[in-house]
Image (cartoon, grey):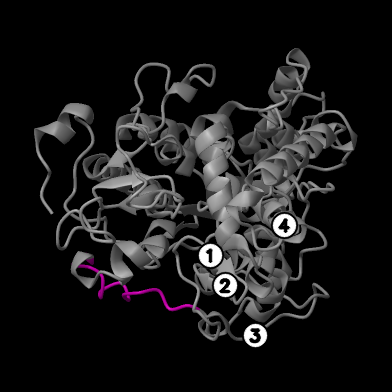
Amino acid sequence: MADSGNRMRDRTPDDVIIQAQARKPITDPSLGIAVEVSRQGTPKHRLVTIGDSLSHGFQSGAIFNTSLSYPMMIAKEMGWSNQMRYPTYDGPRDGFPLNLEHLARQLDREFGDINWLDFAPALLFIRHYMDDVEDYWERDAGSRFPIQRGINHNLAVYGWDLRNTLSRTADICLDIIRKNPPKDDYLRQVVEYHNERAAIRVLNSARDAQGNALTPLQAAAALGAEGTPESGEDGIETLLVVIGGNNALGSILTFKAAWTKEGYDDMAVNDRYTVWRPIHFKAELDKLVEEVKQIRARHVILATVPHVTIVPFARGINKNKEGNKANPGSRYFPYYSLPWLTEEEFDPDKHPYLTEEEARAIDSAIDQYNDYITDAVRQARQEGRDWYLFEMAGLLDRLASRRYIQDPEARPTWWDEVGGQYELPPELQALSPVPDSRFFKSDATGRTQGGLFSLDGIHPTTIGYGIMAQELIEIMHKKAGVKFYESDGKTERTGDIRVDFNRLIALDTLISNPPRSLSNAQSLIGLIDKNFNIFSGMLRASY
């Protein structure tokens, strides 16, 4: 579809190239460039991950069950899960800032089938619930950081962008917390500096011989240096770099397209921006790529950035024709706003929103990000490095229910060339209803829609993370030649390596045991948010 005119260009930087359709995904992770790789011996650290919330394991508004992050799923299939080090966030309320699934279950237990007569007591219940979470992580056991030996292998931190990954360390986060003692706000019961608290658990053990704190890239370099120099062996077998989503995600969390200007590379001021101009993203990416090249890793996989306007947290709304796009054949709705607003409730004079034109501009910028990431992989392979491209953007596009699957007219010209709608594993196809990318809903009968995204509408469910794990395993095993072993770590597995989705279904409580009154609970949470800005405000502070 053509550019919608000067109104969009007036608000969009000149270096954003507006596209009529989404960028065509790359189907060959090696980009058709052969590389000779020495596969002698097994590096000490078989899997290391640098990234953001997707790699960290964030889900339903909280970081909690990190043993089910997709890097840990891969490690399990490698027979290496007992060796992989990762941060943990155990607590009485299942993590922080706020575990919406745990809260929904508590509301279910306390009130059953919620009705609006329960609003006042439910609001008081939620206030006490959040106060408990805040106290635990700010003042009680959760405020004490664990002593750990050895750098974590999962070095991802939710909310971090390219600049954070280049510059931020545990000591920076510790200094922020020390200078800002927690305050107990009666109304806004949110864990203060929750991102810094989460990051410290990831990076506090990442230090050099003198005790200096390391960035995630420097920490990975330290692990890579633990190879055998005389034999040229790398310390890391596979390095996953899945970063960049937060350079655009703020646009849908705030429903504001604030394009970067001066200070985009300064952590002290760049929070004012919600989406990075392509030229600024490339400048940051170039720095990150140069550091990754210094890491002694046998294989490196870089992921493309998903189109953030697809996630169900940003609900497409058409005030005139419910459920319809802006125009026939368009992939966009006229407005994008909070997921609990209906067409009747949404008021552009009252509620935050992005327009169709803004969504297109953001997606077009992300397409340029992904061209730069692809170019980085191409250049690395031309230099003889065994780098690969993980098409995470194409994966989400092919799962996009409202954008493409339910609207064949909106599908891009390349849709069938790349395989069309993504084929879910048989175990997921056997579920009823079949999981999709719509906002999660359930009632007394069970799950009624969604299933690939958790309750925050941004991060995957456990089975959703399983799909990511499976796609990365395909690259590692079939393209990079990484060996996978049974749980003993010694018996090599043969044939296709498949994630055990039946296991993930059982462990994914949203799928195996969905909250019974979630539909009403969602409405209640939406009403609370409209009055007190608790949940959306917290999510905005998390990106």
Q: Amino acid at mark 3?
A: Thr
User: Are the residues at dot 4 and dot 1 in contact (C-beta closer than 8 Å)?
Assistant: no
Real-space Cα distance between discs 4 and 3? Answer: 51 Å
Name the mark on residue 441. Answer: 1
Return the disc, 4 or 1, that comes first in the chain's sequence. 4
Say what secondary structure mark 2 lies in.
strand
Crowdedness of circle 2 by 10 Å Cα count: few (<14), some, many (20+)?
many
Q: Residue at x 23, y 67 (%)?
A: 411
Say what secondary structure mark 3 lies in.
loop
Q: Is residue 183 left or right of residue 309?
A: right
Q: Which residue is mark 2?
A: 447
Visible residue check, residue 307? no
Q: Is residue 84 left or right of residue 400?
A: right
Q: Which residue is mark 4?
A: 111
Q: Does the magenta run of residues contain 419?
A: yes
> x and y percent of residue 394 in the render?
37, 61
Say what secondary structure mark 4 lies in.
helix
Real-space Cα distance between discs 3 and 2? Answer: 36 Å
User: Are the residues at dot 1 and dot 3 in contact (C-beta closer than 8 Å)?
Assistant: no
Viewer-closest of 345 and 509:
345
Question: Disc 3 vs disc 2: which is toward the camera?
Answer: 2
- Outermost residue toward the front in this view: 117
Real-space Cα distance between discs 2 and 4? Answer: 19 Å
Residues in magenta, as a range: 411-424
- Outermost residue toward the top in this view: 179
Q: Amino acid at mark 4?
A: Phe
Q: Which residue is mark 3?
A: 494
Real-space Cα distance between discs 2 and 1? Answer: 6 Å
Return the disc, 2 or 4, that comes first in the chain's sequence. 4
User: Are the residues at dot 2 and dot 1 in contact (C-beta closer than 8 Å)?
Assistant: yes
